[in-house]
């Protein structure tokens, strides 16, 4: 999807004949009502997509129905600046699902990010994700992934994927679920050791890394 200027669609549907086929953004785009991922990949290609419909998703994480509706398609970010910007959420509570896939060309694995907004003003939410073998390269602005208690390098215990997440609202309360592929799983993680978030906050948010 190209052009001389960024395009705003009322509805945009990705409907290919195989999961390995894709549509690539050559410019950033916006969708006012519904992005429908029927089959195939929407590759952001270091661009962004704005979802201007702030309503929540319905049904399941596997097949959400709402502003982003998925049957068997994927959004491929795989770059810290390849953002999905879900706008106008504000104080509208509910589940929302961003149907990411990993970067595998032939058969992407489904690794959706989902969040249950329960109260407060979330504003707009922006998220990107990418695979990072051995936890490299770090996201922009991150200077280490050390353990907050011991200051030791926490890379061996960290999933080989990063998520860049921000919001504009002042006081949201939400439950976040991050998903990754089996090969990105850190050593020692499993059913009884599911891991926990290690967020890096910007200087405006207090700076630094914490085990949460």
Image: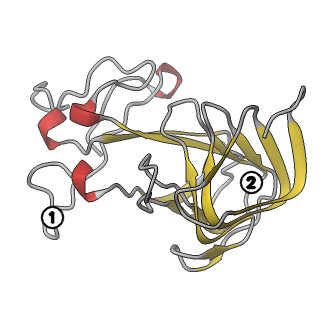
> Where 60 falls versus 195 (above or below)?
below
Percent coordinates x, y for residue 206 in the rendering? 44, 25
Instruction: State the mark number for residue 203.
Output: none
Could you say which is closer to the camera, residue 155 or residue 123? 155
Q: In the structure shown, which secondary structural element does the residue marked by tag 1 occupy?
A: loop
| Horizontal side of residue 43 vs 7, given as left or right | left
Identify the residue at horizontal 50%, vertical 31% (top origin). 80
- Contact check, label 1 and label 2, Cβ < 8 Å: no
Quadrant of the image containing the N terminus: top right
Q: Quadrant of residue 150?
A: top left
Residue most extreme to the bottom: 59
Alpha-carbon neighbours of circle 2 within 10 Å: few (<14), some, or many (≥20)? Answer: many
Q: In the structure shown, which secondary structural element does the residue marked by tag 2 occupy?
A: loop
Question: In this figure, which colouring scheme has been used for the structure?
Answer: secondary structure
Identify the residue at horizontal 14%, vertical 62% (top origin). 193
> Where 83 falls versus 193 (above or below)?
above
Percent coordinates x, y for residue 42 in the rendering? 64, 51
Q: What's the distance in space between the residues labelled 1 and 2, CA to CA?
A: 35 Å
Identify the residue at horizontal 38%, vertical 31% (top origin). 200
Identify the residue at horizontal 66%, vertical 71% (top origin). 57
Alpha-carbon neighbours of circle 1 within 10 Å: few (<14), some, or many (≥20)? Answer: few
Percent coordinates x, y for residue 174 in the rendering? 52, 59
Q: Quadrant of residue 11?
A: bottom right
Percent coordinates x, y for residue 23 in the rendering? 68, 48
Tell me the residue that label 2 is attached to. Answer: 90
Q: Quadrant of residue 140?
A: top left
Which mark's residue is nearer the viewer, 1 or 2? 1
Tell me the residue that label 1 is attached to. Answer: 190
| Horizontal side of residue 62 vs 65, given as left or right | left
| Horizontal side of residue 50 vs 172, given as left or right | right
| Horizontal side of residue 96 vs 110, given as left or right | right
- Nearer the N terminus, badge 1 or badge 2? 2
């Amino acid at each position: 999807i190209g052009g001389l200027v960024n395009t705003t669609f009322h509805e945009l549907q990705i409907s290919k004949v195989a999961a390995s086929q894709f549509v690539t953004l050559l410019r950033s785009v916006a969708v006012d009502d519904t992005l429908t991922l029927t089959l195939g990949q929407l590759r952001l290609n270091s661009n962004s997509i704005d979802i201007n419909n702030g309503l929540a998703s319905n049904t399941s994480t596997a097949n959400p129905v709402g502003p982003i509706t998925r049957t068997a398609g994927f959004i491929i970010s795989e770059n810290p600046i390849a953002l999905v910007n879900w706008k106008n959420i504000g104080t509208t509570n509910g589940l929302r699902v961003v149907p990411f896939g990993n970067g595998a060309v032939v058969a992407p694995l489904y690794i959706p990010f989902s969040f249950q907004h329960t109260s407060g003003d979330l504003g707009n939410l922006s998220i990107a994700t990418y695979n990072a073998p051995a936890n490299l390269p770090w996201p922009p602005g991150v200077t280490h992934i050390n353990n907050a208690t011991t200051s030791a390098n926490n890379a061996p215990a960290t999933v080989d994927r990063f998520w860049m997440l921000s919001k504009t609202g002042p006081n949201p309360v939400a439950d976040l679920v991050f998903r990754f592929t089996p090969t990105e799983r850190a050593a020692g993680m499993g059913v009884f050791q599911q891991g926990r978030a290690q967020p890096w906050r910007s200087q405006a948010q207090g700076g630094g890394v914490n085990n949460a």
